[in-house]
Image (cartoon, rainbow, N blue to C red):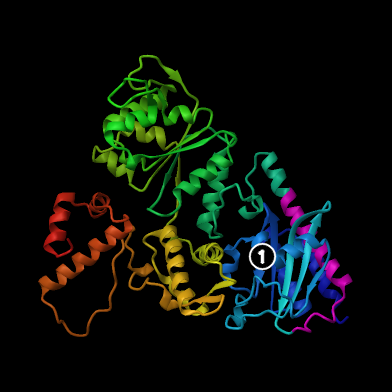
Amino acid sequence: MFYDSNDLTDLALDLTNIISDQDRFERLLATIRKLFKCDASALLAFKGGQFSPLAINGLSQDVLGRRFALDQHPRLEAIARAGDIVRFPADSSLPDPYDGLISSHTEELKVHACIGLPLLADQQLIGAVTIDGFDQFQFDQFSDDLLRKVAALAAVSLNNAMLMEQLEKRDGGISRVEPVLSHTNSNPEIIGRSLQIKRLQSQIEAVANTELTVLVTGETGVGKELVASAVHKLSLRSQAPLIYLNCAALPESVAESELFGHVKGAFTGAVSNRSGKFELADKGTLFLDEIGELSLPLQAKLLRVLQSGDLQRVGDDRRLQVDVRIIAATNRDLNREVAANNFRADLYHRLSVFPLPVPALRERDNDILLLAGFFIERCRIKLGLMHLSLAEQCQSSLLDYAWPGNVRELEHSIYRAAILARAETRNADVIIQAHHFDIGGVSKSSVNQLGSVLTCEQSPPLIEQSLKDATEQFQRSYIKQALKQNESNWTAAARTLSVDVGNLHRLAKRLGMK
């Protein structure tokens, strides 16, 4: 056994210093890597039947976004069930979850030396530390006794972080531990570690256990529904239902009935009494998605319910009292809509008691890679692949792209790229390369202050088009991008471009787009 005992002393001192949990976790792994001369290590939290990375060292950045379910990763399952140090033989038939993900050896798939340290508190599994290397004899010199000491120190550090989180929640404080610590399979999880997401997480935790109405704002595809779900799950109403209603999909003829219900015979086709979304959400939360799409008459009726808490079913004179918390969401600028007389000012002020702006993906730094890892792991399971990873050379492309469709576009791009990569690969170890993505041309630098996306193409050295042709080419490109941003909805695209929808259709026809 050859190691410097000062490393263990430094580790123990690091874990007692007054630093953030994240810094403490990262120092833990840095010391482990120095102590064992390993190629990679990771600290994982265990909850809800899965391991979630809290910190990594030597692994690809997208690993932080992956979630490792035990039933999908037999090696991690063996660590979870062992109760003691697990040394995997170099020829183990159990696939290593980090194959192809060690940043300095991304093209070398197989990890040959692996040790798992289960972390226990009160005899309960709370996490694990994994230590990996490419030399199969890399860890033979280290005794189980040393490994158990490291595991004990790591377990104390993780358990203290979890206890502090519980204490802060009990006292009504805002948790400072990474959100993953309080995540379970049944709860929504907002993937990300950027300052913007940490700020959003703090705001969610601050407002969740109040009764304030929340207005979630942001571009299409940023995850407004996930934010609403997180607010509900952390609220005092979490055991009651969260009822969802997409206001943009409500035909005017049935909108009032959908919201407030109707009685038998109220209109043609009303063959029985029917509860509306407000009744269904009684004692719980009603999430009104795309609230900006409601008509002005319906806005007035909605305002009445929000003010008084009572409603009338269509065709019924009786009043019903409901206790509902409202969370609304929109991708429109309701301030501008109010100024344009498209949205009631009194309803807007009633809804925006606590605004929650969700940042666009292009504003979230390296969260793009974490989200890519999260979707890659999901995709790997759906496609039945042994391993699915992201080539290092294409990560910069993902970071530079503006993602006008935000998280939804990233998810769909990952799935398409994975399918294309699988088609080019004859085995179960698939690597997604840059050419599998179709995301060229729209960089972050091409996004203007309003969030509209311009297609940036390199200017030719000589002018080879007439001004008319160049203008029409730009118009076609700009309209296509507006349609993509608004999921091919011409009405929404017209609003983004600040033009009449009829004029937009006529222009598109003249440009040969229809």
Q: How many labels does the image show?
A: 1
Q: Where is residue 371 in the image (x, y as percent from the top left)?
A: 52, 62
Instruction: Decide: is 368 above or below 273.
Output: below
Quarter where residue 253 is shown:
top left
Pick the front one: 481 or 420: 420
Q: Is residue 357 left or right of residue 150?
A: left
In the rendered image, residue 154 lying in the magenta stretch gets the answer yes
Who's the residue at 19% across and 52% down the image? 499
Instruction: Decide: is 411 above or below 388.
Output: above
Q: Is residue 346 left or right of residue 308?
A: left
Residue labelled with disc 1 = 73
* Magenta region, main secondary structure: helix
Pick the front one: 174 or 127: 127
Instruction: Decide: is 249 above or below 504.
Output: above
* Image quadrant occupied by the N terminus: bottom right
Who's the residue at 19% across and 65% down the image? 475
Pick the front one: 17 or 211: 211
Who's the residue at 56% across and 67% down the image? 384
Residue type at mark 1: give it.
His
In the displayed orientation, state which residue is furthest to the top.
Answer: 317
Who's the residue at 77% across and 83% down the image? 138
Q: Where is residue 289 in the image (x, y as percent from the top left)?
A: 40, 42
As helix, strand or loop, the secondary structure at mark 1 comes to loop
* Magenta residues (range): 136-163
In the rendered image, residue 261 lying in the magenta stretch gets the answer no
